[in-house]
Amino acid sequence: MSTPAAAAPLPPWAAEIASLYASHAASQFILHGNVQDCLPLPGPSSDLSRLGKLEDYILEVLIPQFAVVLTYDLGGGLRVVRGQQHFNAWPSAPAAGSPMPRAPREAIDVLTHYARYISNVRRAGGSAIKAAFVLRDAHLAIPSLPGGLNYDLNAMALQVKTWASEPLLTEHPFAAFLFTENLNDLHPLIARDPRSSNIRVPLPPPAMLADTFRRLAPVYPVSLGPWQDRWHIPSAQLAGATLVSIESLLKIKEYRREPISEGDLSKLKKELVEKDCQDLIEFIDPVRTLDDLHGQEAVKEWLRQDLALWRQNDTAAMPMGYLFCGPVGTGKTWMVECLAGEAGVPVVKLKNFRDRWVGSTEGNLEKIFRLLQALGKCFVFIDEADQALGKRGTGTDGDSGVGGRVYSMMAKEMSNTANRGRIIWILASSRPDLIEVDLKRPGRVDVKIPIFPTLTPEEGFALLRALCQKRQVPLEESAFESLKPHIPNWLTPGAAEALAMKIYRLVKTKGLSPAESALACLTDYQPAVSPEIMQFQIDLAVSEATDLSFVPPALRPAGKV
């Protein structure tokens, strides 16, 4: 495998394939990840805007000298895309005009027999015919299924394994390429075969995006017009999106004669990435800063110190992750939004990645991890982490082992030191005791921050007053004395928000003053969470804190005040 001397350097994943093949270390490659995207293709200087599928890239860049190339997918069946004359010389080739096999088992049989035929011809002294097989969406033809009792699937998987292990084939100039978005979707006999090389195709990095924008500029002069010779700006902003989605955006913008403005970029990135990830993640717009966080001064100081190190790229003391824990309604999500706004980086919230189909949950996580690797600096927010992160189990909880596999994948990704300074995990939970201890250890979650409700009437009044002010129903400071006996203990931001809304409603519907409305609402107030549960969750948050400076003196253990 080689490319012309004048061609652009190979991307790392393609260079790895070329190196493995040239050294005879591997001849079968399972390409996973961003395999549905398009790639820039080589071409004459008059046509620098060519984008093609992964299959096109392999045929034109990696194996242009291979005489025979056969492809297979469930929709199109088996096809000869190069070297029909060589293939027809095979005595067992389907007769002219006869249909090629479409069913997976028959197609795999034909491919295997043909590979053995050309290898035997070479061993017998005949000419060596370089041949390659490409299996698009291999996981649909040879999927991973529970139980391992599907004999046809197992037989096909074993045949494909022989392509990478049978000496007759490995000694021949032969290569096989299997495409699958997620390794977990492919039959494990193939996906875990040590003789095959698993090659991850990443989302396009900013350098590739910048080069692609430069090449596409003549095709989309209006939409890309504002960025001439400044391609690094949109490429950095749109990192994490696929070239397919970006090209679709350019076509729409060009049709509408709308240039892409700087203000468009963050919105476009959110739309493109969420669309590519099919509702597995959600971008949270960081419109707040830590100045919007009520109280928590020790916590804010700590977080600002971390962010200062992050901006300086001094990552040695940067945490891999945070755990925000505290009673229900204390504002854990709010704190995440404030932190992200202070940092000026995206917040990716994981959602809906669990699926009822076996293997789909793991595949969804693979897709999410690929995105995170492409985004650059970001926070990854997992709400209700005690439920989302799985357990170190083996399926005894009735979920066929999905929880255990989710746990293993999350644990591995959260402790990946290559992510330090790039990806910061934020877990939020009112029941941190239900999160596996290993997921909360240093190296995955280095800083555990407790968040508490108000502890005094003064704190409760200040919180309520701030929220009423936002609704244009200001509470005068002089109202505190009359309201003080009615202000509940352990008022959470969530409960205070509901009270402020009720106060606003009474002001507008009954014509009462804000102070009168507040007194009426507080007199009839019933806490949404029982005092027993609130006390239990407060105690959990105190016990989880990594630093007692985060805990108000009134809540610290005896002797630690």
Image (cartoon, rainbow, N blue to C red):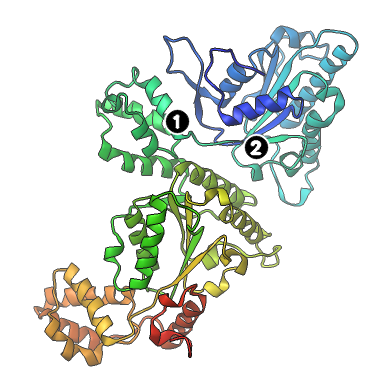
* Rendered image quadrant of residue 15: top right
Q: Residue at x 71, y 40 (%)?
A: 191
User: From mark 2 to mark 1, how far is it between C-alphas?
Assistant: 33 Å
Indicate the secondary structure of the residue bearing disc 2. Answer: helix
Residue situated in front as seen by the camera: 342 or 452? 342
Q: Residue at x 32, y 57 (%)?
A: 342
Q: Nearer the viewer, residue 469 or 230?
A: 230
Image vertical order of residue 294 relative to residue 218, above or below: below
Q: What is the x, y in percent for residue 270?
A: 37, 44
Residue 430, horizontal then vertical, whole percent: 47, 73
Q: Is residue 267 left or right of residue 397?
A: left
User: Which label belongs to residue 291?
Assistant: none
Q: Is residue 27 found left or right of 531 in the rendered image?
A: right
Q: Is residue 159 above or below residue 85?
A: below
Provide the secondary structure element on which disc 1 rests: helix
Q: Could you tell me which residue is drawn at 47 percent across and 44 percent down?
A: 277
Residue occupied by mark 2? 140
Type of amino acid at the residue the image marks with label 1: Ala
Mark 1, residues whose alpha carbon is within 10 Å: few (<14), some, or many (≥20)?
some
Residue 73 shows in the view: no
Q: Is residue 374 visible?
A: yes
Total labels: the figure holds: 2
Which mark is nearer the camera, 2 or 1?
A: 1
Q: Quadrant of the N terminus?
A: top right
Report which residue position mark 1 lands on: 207
**Amino acid tagged 2:** Leu
